[in-house]
């Protein structure tokens, strides 16, 4: 279990990295190409400074928010990440328990080891969203949408910044390096699919056959028209895409560069947030992930217009260190830090966190 004195997300990162086997550490950390975007996500937050307001009554603070109609105790939720079994044997069931124990939301990845039914059973009262892959066969998509709806998931997340999965590269890599532990993908393998085992050439050929790469707006529209749940687009970085999504009736614009794991050389998410919030004009909720490591980062993202932020790797570090409890500890740290930074900034409630609280450091140049 994690060192009892771990009091920050970066300490969890350190302990997790000491604990995890090298191939997992690399997989979790892996930035795209040169890692510029990965580093910039974290560093960009530090280029914004807070201008606190003093002498306001902040003795009692309320960090709660409503996100797509669900009340969360604080505006930090868990981003979809693949195969939590690599971090902990209890996998996504543990992550869901950790999130639910803190009364916040979790997005379950399609690439999860636990089925969406198992995750629902593990944390029945938790707020759960489902990240649906695009498939060539729409009947398959419909069945997954119905499963998610039936199990009480309250939003569908479509990841739109991953047009290609590089299956060929994965096939080549895995031939020399089989996965050292048993994982399954019960949210992808449907009933009688002949899917092979992860890591095998057969499995990758199967994925290549069923997964739809290079999805378009038309696929998004189909999902929108075939579920009663609100749809969130994850991976939006431009005002144009944000606007097009809103015009299509999308409920959530999730600003993300995939934690720097896809294309390198993309801007830090915090740097594009303002532009997107302006384009959306209050017609949808706006979220952000990428590089959120402290409560101050959360406050800055909220000040610039995010309704809620998501954490990817920090939740995996918590899970790796302490299972469900570790996820809870990481979330608790961020909640406590947000609470403190709100007090110090003159904010008693989330709606007090306004754009005027934050300036970009370039401001000082003028
Ligand atoms: C991811 N991410 C991701 N995103 C997604 O839409 N579907 C997925 O299956 C995955 N899988 C995944 C695996 C791992 C190991 C990581 C680290 C990330 C991206 C994730 O949702 C999120 O955008 C980033 O992780 C956010 O950045 P931070 O918080 O990790 O800095």
Image (cartoon, rainbow, N blue to C red):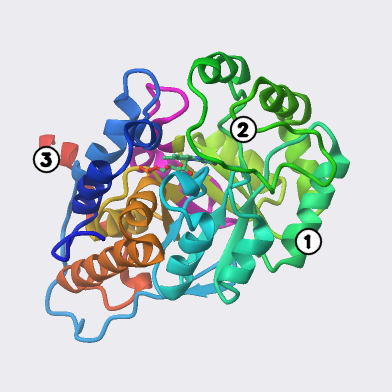
Look at the picture and state if 177 lies above or below 248. above
Q: Is residue 133 above or below residue 157?
A: above
Along the polypeptide, which appears first: circle 2 or circle 3? 2
Regarding mark 1 in the picture, which secondary structure is present there? loop
Question: Around disc 3, counting alpha carbons within 10 Å, would you say few (fewer than 14), some (14 to 19), or many (20 or more)?
Answer: few
Residue under pointer 1 = 228
Query: Would you identify the image quadrant in which residue 319 lies?
Result: bottom left
At a point 83% along the width and 49% down the height, the residue shown is: 142
Q: Residues within 10 Å of mark 2 (few under 14, many from 20)?
A: some
Please give the residue where the numbered disc 3 appears in the rendered image: 364
Provide the secondary structure element on which disc 3 rests.
helix
Name the image quarter holding the N terminus.
bottom left
State the image coordinates of residue 206 (x, y, percent, origin top left).
74, 27
Which of the 4 image quarters holds residue 4?
A: bottom left
The answer to whether residue 290 is visible is yes
**Tags 1 and 2 touching, CB below 8 Å:** no
Dot 1, how many residues are within 10 Å of its Cα: few (below 14), some (14-19), or many (20+)?
some
Q: In the rendered view, does 256 fall on the left or right side of 195?
A: left
- Mark in the foreground, 3 or 1: 1
* Residue bearing mark 2: 198
Magenta region, residue range = 259-287
Residue at the extreme right: 139
Q: Position of residue 215 (x, y in %)?
A: 71, 29
Residue beneath the point at 77% across and 42% down: 221
Check if residue 331 falls in the magenta segment.
no
User: What count of labels does the image hold?
Assistant: 3
What is the x, y in percent for residue 265? 37, 21
Mark 1 to mark 2 CA distance (whole Å):
32 Å
Q: Earlier in the sequence, mark 1 or mark 2?
A: 2
């Amino acid at each position: 279990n994690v060192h009892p004195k771990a009091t920050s997300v970066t300490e969890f990162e350190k302990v997790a990295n000491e604990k995890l086997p090298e191939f997992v550490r690399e997989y979790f950390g892996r930035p795209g190409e040169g890692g510029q975007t990965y580093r910039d996500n974290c560093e960009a937050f530090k280029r914004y400074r807070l201008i606190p307001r003093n002498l306001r009554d902040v003795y009692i603070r309320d960090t709660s928010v409503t996100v797509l109609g669900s009340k969360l105790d604080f505006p930090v939720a868990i981003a979809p990440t693949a195969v939590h079994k690599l971090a902990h044997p209890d996998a996504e069931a543990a992550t869901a328990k950790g999130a639910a124990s803190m009364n916040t939301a979790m997005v379950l990845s399609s690439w999860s080891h636990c089925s969406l039914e198992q995750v629902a059973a593990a944390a029945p009262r938790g707020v759960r969203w489902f990240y649906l892959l695009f498939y060539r066969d729409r009947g398959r998509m419909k069945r997954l949408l119905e499963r998610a709806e039936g199990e009480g998931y309250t939003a569908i997340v479509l990841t739109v910044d991953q047009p290609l999965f590089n299956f060929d590269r994965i096939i080549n890599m895995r031939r020399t390096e089989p996965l050292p532990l048993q994982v399954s993908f019960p949210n992808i393998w449907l009933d009688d699919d002949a899917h092979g085992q992860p890591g095998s050439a057969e499995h990758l050929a199967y994925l290549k056959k069923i997964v739809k790469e290079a999805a378009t707006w038309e696929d998004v529209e189909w999902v929108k028209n075939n579920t009663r749940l609100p749809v969130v687009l994850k991976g939006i970085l431009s005002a144009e895409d944000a606007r097009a999504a809103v015009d299509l009736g999308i409920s959530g614009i999730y600003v993300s560069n995939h934690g720097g794991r896809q294309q390198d050389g993309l801007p830090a998410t915090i740097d594009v947030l303002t532009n997107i919030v302006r384009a959306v004009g209050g017609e949808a909720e706006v979220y952000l992930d990428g590089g959120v490591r402290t409560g101050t980062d959360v406050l800055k993202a909220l000040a610039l217009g995010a309704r809620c932020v998501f954490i990817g790797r920090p939740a995996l570090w918590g899970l790796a260190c302490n299972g469900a409890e570790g996820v809870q500890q990481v979330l608790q740290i961020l909640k406590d830090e947000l609470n403190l930074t709100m007090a110090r900034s003159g904010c008693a409630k989330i709606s007090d966190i306004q754009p005027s609280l934050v300036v970009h450091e370039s401001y000082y140049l003028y």
